[in-house]
Image (cartoon, rainbow, N blue to C red):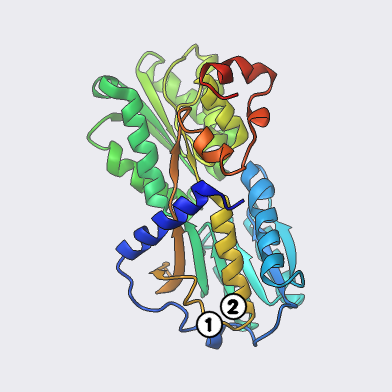
Amino acid sequence: MRRAAVAIAAGAMAVSLAACGSAKESGDNADSTGSAKKGDDIKVGLLLPENATARYEKFDRPLIQKKVKELTNGKGEVVYANAKQDASTQNQQVDTMVTNKVDVLIVDAVDSKAIAGSVKKAKDAGIPVVAYDRLAEGPIDAYTSFDNETVGKTQGEALLKALGDKAKDGQIVMMNGSSTDPNAAQFKKGAHSVLDGKVKIGREYDTKEWKPENANSNMEGAISALGKDKIVGVYSANDGMAGGIITALKAAGIADIPVTGQDAELAGVQRIVTGEQYMSVYKPYPQEADVAAEMAVALAQGKSLDSIAKDKVDSPTTKAIPSVLVPVVSLTKDNIKDTVIKDGIYTVSEICTGKYKAACDKIGLN
């Protein structure tokens, strides 16, 4: 899956991380906090937060499993569990992983605060923890994600570009992600840094559990409150919510206004092809997954993270966490070929099914 665009992203990442100014080495605590040194016969616990968003089952899980196998000569095992958006379930899953004596955990937290106690349990049992995609609280050993404020800025900049002069007169609706997800706060912060002062925000919501149906209800409320002729665009923090938002817009007879997204889900890409959705944020999942696997295997084997993580970030509970932040790309109908198709995320035939074929032909996607 590491194709040209991902290689380019890797180069951009190196520049981005260098600019962060962290010159200290990042593997100082690997031997002291990791499990005892082991060979390739390791057990990696992988905990993902939900399965409503397509990326987790389609990309993250198989990519991490594949990389762990590659790094351990086929001997490493990935033990997987999905919390289905339930923080209590995820805490129980951590307990089970600890009881089963995995050598390392990769955790994408449902709730970054609620997971802290379970992270400490794992740590106390000698099991290092890699925070994946979301910066979990507690004594984690490593972290990889995308530059989340940049995600929000990318979305905001794209929305302003699409609005043009309409930004001066109309109002937008902001549909942020879940308040329990620290990434959502960073997306929001990045978006506000671009949108504030440039366009009037008529209504803004934190969407419970990122659910499309909740975004749909929120959008219906915004339309009722503002009036359908007053809304010129919608900031949506991800593609799933964008789907719910667009359904509400259609029901109200609102068309041809830009809606943002994130994750480059297949349905989102198809809506971009037809013009229903203006953009998404494409995240090179292969790179993020590979980094998480590399961190996990190194920690399980008692090795340093020096060659993997050159940056450090702080969580509310832990300072100087060895980290890798992966850059992102604004995905519009103009660069579908050069991103998700080039990287092997989707094929043209997957995107351009019957009802989308004419729209695909129109933009040269064939």
Relative to 12, is 63 on the left or the right?
right
Task: Identify residue type, mark 2.
Answer: Leu
- Picture quadrant where residue 323 is located: bottom left
Above/below status of 29 relative to 92: below
- The tag earlier along the polypeptide, 1 or 2, is 1
Q: CA distance from mark 1 to mark 2?
A: 6 Å
Q: What is the crowding at mark 2: few (fewer than 14 residues within 10 Å), some, or many (at least 20)? A: many
> Which residue shows up at 44% across the image and 47% down it?
328
SS label for mark 1: helix
Task: Identify residue type, mark 1.
Answer: Ala
- Using the image as rendered, state which of residue 120 and residue 39 is in the foreground: 39
- Percent across and percent down for residue 167 are 28, 24
Q: Which mark is residue 299?
A: 2
Residues under numbered marks 1 and 2 in contact, where contact means CB atoms less than 8 Å apart: yes
- Percent across and percent down for residue 251 are 55, 15
> Which residue shows up at 40% across the image and 22% down it?
225
Q: Does residue 343 appear in this view?
A: yes
- Percent across and percent down for residue 311 are 40, 69
Q: Which mark is residue 341?
A: none
Task: Residue under label 1, please give it.
Answer: 30
- Using the image as rendered, state which of residue 36 and residue 204 is in the foreground: 36
Above/below status of 214 relative to 171: below
SS label for mark 2: helix
> Which residue shows up at 43% across the image and 25% down it?
222
- Using the image as rendered, state which of residue 282 and residue 366 is in the foreground: 366
Above/below status of 7 relative to 171: below
